[in-house]
Amino acid sequence: MAMAAALRFLQLLLIFPLTWAEEECGTSGCKGNGKGVLLMQTKPGSLLKASASQVDLSTVLAEVQELKGQMSSMMNKMDSCCCKETVTFSLADTGLCAIFGDPHFITFDGAETTTVGDMIQWLVKTSSIHIQGLSKASEGFVAGFAASGSFMGDHRLVLLREEKEGPIKVTYDGVEILQVAGSSFDVNGVVKAYRRNSWDSDLFDDRILSMRTRMNFTLGDFEDRFKNLPTEGMYLFKLPNHIDITVTGVDWLGVIISMPVQVGQSGYCGNFNGDADDDAEPVVPSWDRPIGADIGPVPDAEVIFPQEPVALLLGKAEKALTEEEEVAQRIKRINACPNTLLTKAEEAFSGFSA
């Protein structure tokens, strides 16, 4: 406050720099009646006192204007360098959304949902941010994600896995990147991408390893999926707006999106408003159906994924399941014993007879 007051005082001095002292001069000297003597501080250490007839007023005013300009420039520099608050970013400002399995979703607000079928879905959608997922086959396993939008300068980042145990392919604007483990890819202001052999706590977000679900899965928890079991390595994509996407090749694919709240966001990752109840509604035990805006297949005109590999992955479009058919298929999957558990059970009881 003291600095601001001092600067304001100097500014006022420059705005009103001219003072006239009245003097009346005769044969016996000058008496103050004052017409014609100019007093002015033009520069530090110099005082001009002269009769008005000896002063070039236009020159003086020009100098005053120059000093005013210098003061204004100095104040602007002080504002830009010293007086603005520094905005810092923290991971605490972000939430996590998970897409994994056949596929299951954990929204930013913590709701747990699932869906079935061949589909390209919105994971996150805003006016500038477009992130889509692709689920494959009648069981709906996650087979890829794609990101684009004006926040990336409308560039396209796509990750696909055409077969459950097949190679993972990543492209940027149609050009394949990250073809070998340990490689990186960087486009300034758009994406920083990394492929590593295993989990690296200096690079990846350790919060992922602590994520939990209501259901117990055969393949284990997120620490198993992202740290203990990966055989195809780990992928990380750092995008503008503090958006990170981490991918593991376990159980076809697992995808985690980390990001701050975005205005008007929608999709299967939820609206990120702090209320999990408006992201899902219960259907049967262990299955909550996603609800909200932009839940459903992405219209063809808005698909980010390239057409050819998507056609190979999804094949000919199948008739959409009715709600009753979808519930029946989900119940069947819930009640079915996974092959891995069935094999273990058969091995454990192989020595017993009826």
Image (cartoon, grey):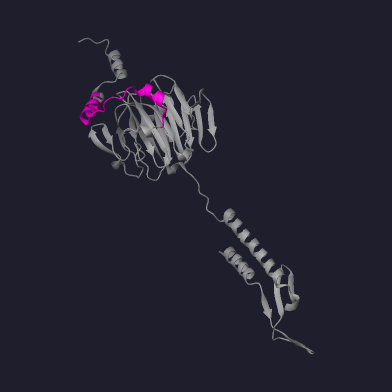
Q: Residue furthest right?
A: 27
Whole-percent x and y of residue 154?
Answer: 47, 37
State left or right for residue 154 relative to residue 5. left
Residue at x 59% of width, y 53% of height: 81
Quadrant in the picture for the C terminus: top left
Q: Is residue 139 magenta?
A: no
Name the image quarter holding residue 207: top left
Quadrant in the picture for the N terminus: bottom right
Whole-percent x and y of residue 254?
Answer: 39, 28
Residue at x 54% of width, y 54% of height: 84
Q: Is residue 211 visible?
A: no
Name the image quarter holding residue 24: bottom right
Is residue 2 positioned above or below 24 on the image?
above
Residue at x 56% of width, y 56% of height: 83
Whole-percent x and y of residue 128?
Answer: 43, 41
Taking depth in this image into account, of 310 and 270 the one nearest to the observer is 310
Residue at x 30% of width, y 15% of height: 343
How many marks are shown on the rendered structure?
Answer: 0
Q: Is residue 322 magenta?
A: yes
Q: Residue furthest front?
A: 301
Taking depth in this image into account, of 290 and 25 the one nearest to the observer is 25
Q: Point out the stretch of residues depicted in magenta.
A: 304-332
Chief secondary structure of the magenta span?
helix
State left or right for residue 25 relative to residue 345. right
Taking depth in this image into account, of 305 and 269 the one nearest to the observer is 305
Is residue 281 positioned above or below 67 on the image?
above
Whole-percent x and y of residue 112?
Answer: 31, 35
Taking depth in this image into account, of 130 and 141 the one nearest to the observer is 130
Q: Is residue 307 visible?
A: yes
